[in-house]
Image: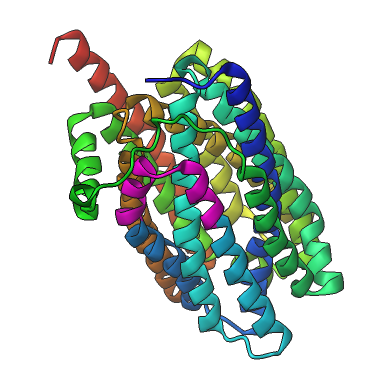
Amino acid sequence: MSALPDELIAGGMRRLIASEVASNFGSMLSRLAIPWIAALFLNATPLQMAWLVIADVAAGALGTLVVGGLVDRRSRRVVMVIADAVRAFAMVVVITLFAFDVLSFWMLVVQAAVNGVAAMAFSVARSAWIADNVPDDALTLRNSQMSAASSTSESVAFAGGGWLFQLFGPLTALITDAVSYLASAWFIRRLPERADASPAMTSDDQRFFADAALGFAAMRTSSMLRTLLISDILMTLSFSISSATYMIYVTRDLAMETGIQGLVFATGALGSLAGAAMAPALGRQLGAGRSLAFGLLAAGIGVVCIPLAPSAALIGVVLLVLHQVIGDTGSVVAMIHGRTLRQLHAPEGARGRVDAAMRTVTQVVTLTGALGGGWVATVTGTREALWVSALVLLLAAPLVCLLLRDRRRAASQGW
């Protein structure tokens, strides 16, 4: 199998990083703007807020049944460019509807579904390109660089996004998001690829459900992939529960102004950058598995800070900042090492399908968590739902440690 020259790999990573900075900046603005539009302009309920998450992940889950096989057989570059174009078009539709004052909540749900499929395709294709072209011993570093780029653009977007929304309204944020996807596609358009990386699809290969089955079969036969799946399930469940309730909790229950919220969210980039910087060194000292468990523990401690916030006063702001810094440090460390282990243990030639299969499971879990979180918040309150989110994540670290220990024991005994 041919390999790209080192200079082309380095150039490709620069293009991927530039694409991430551009698209993530706009995505973070709309991640703030769309929930604020739903909560402040359209008077969305907690369960309706959950539907934004449900539409995103349900479409993504169904889309992965097709995406995995396409990524393994088609040009990763073409898949990413098309995904960016689709996301830009969907955002332009929302902008137009909002500008003419005909936007409804369910139109936001449709946009979330389209974005979910396109984002899934882009993410799977990008991960496959990195796994195919980056040497194994450099995967953690390259994944950390991608995470650092994402965190930097997130910091800038969150720091100014709240004030941008408050001073100029949501339309400016949405337009920026659409432009950012076009910029991302511009950077990706000349991404180098190996000639043999994406074999052409034949008529016998057009078996999308068989592709999905191959990804699930790989997980069943690999104890490491099963452990990674359990880790992803617990992280996803925790985050999806909180995603259905967090914005309402902060905006309505704590009555925090959107400008202050944006500044609080921006501090999460400090944690994300710290996690990206720490991940390679932690991997060398603890190993990727223990680093994954360490990240899960830190993420759980960070989430505990959210329901402890009593109000929008100083102590509440401090606790929410601690969540952003500690929680994001841990979650980034966990995601980097989880991604690296998945790239290393997925069979070559089927990385897209394995990645897609794992994402399908976690997307279904996200649906469950969003519905459950919205229901718990409606029945008992948003603070109680956030406590459930924290407890789920705190269970993840000891469970992953136990599974990794059993895996090492089985390997040493030749099982």
Tell me which segment is drawn in magenta. Answer: 64-83
At horizontal 29% and vertical 55% (from top left) the residue drawn is: 65
Q: Position of residue 226 (x, y in %)?
A: 26, 35
Question: Is residue 248 in sight in this rendering?
Answer: no
Q: Quadrant of the N terminus?
A: top left
Front-most of residues 22 and 188: 188
Give the overall secondary structure of the magenta segment.
Answer: helix
At horizontal 80% and vertical 74% (from top left) the residue drawn is: 169
At horizontal 48% and vertical 18% (from top left) the residue drawn is: 135
Q: Position of residue 103 (x, y in %)?
A: 62, 86
Above or below, comparing residue 77 to residue 406 in the picture? below
- In the rendered image, the residue lying farthest to the right is 167
Q: Left of 161 or right of it: where is 51?
A: left
Front-most of residues 327 and 183: 183
Q: Left of 370 or right of it: where is 191?
A: right
Question: Is residue 156 in sight in this rendering?
Answer: yes
| Residue 400 among those drawn in magenta | no
Above or below, comparing residue 221 to residue 167 in the picture? above
At horizontal 31% and vertical 32% (from top left) the residue drawn is: 349
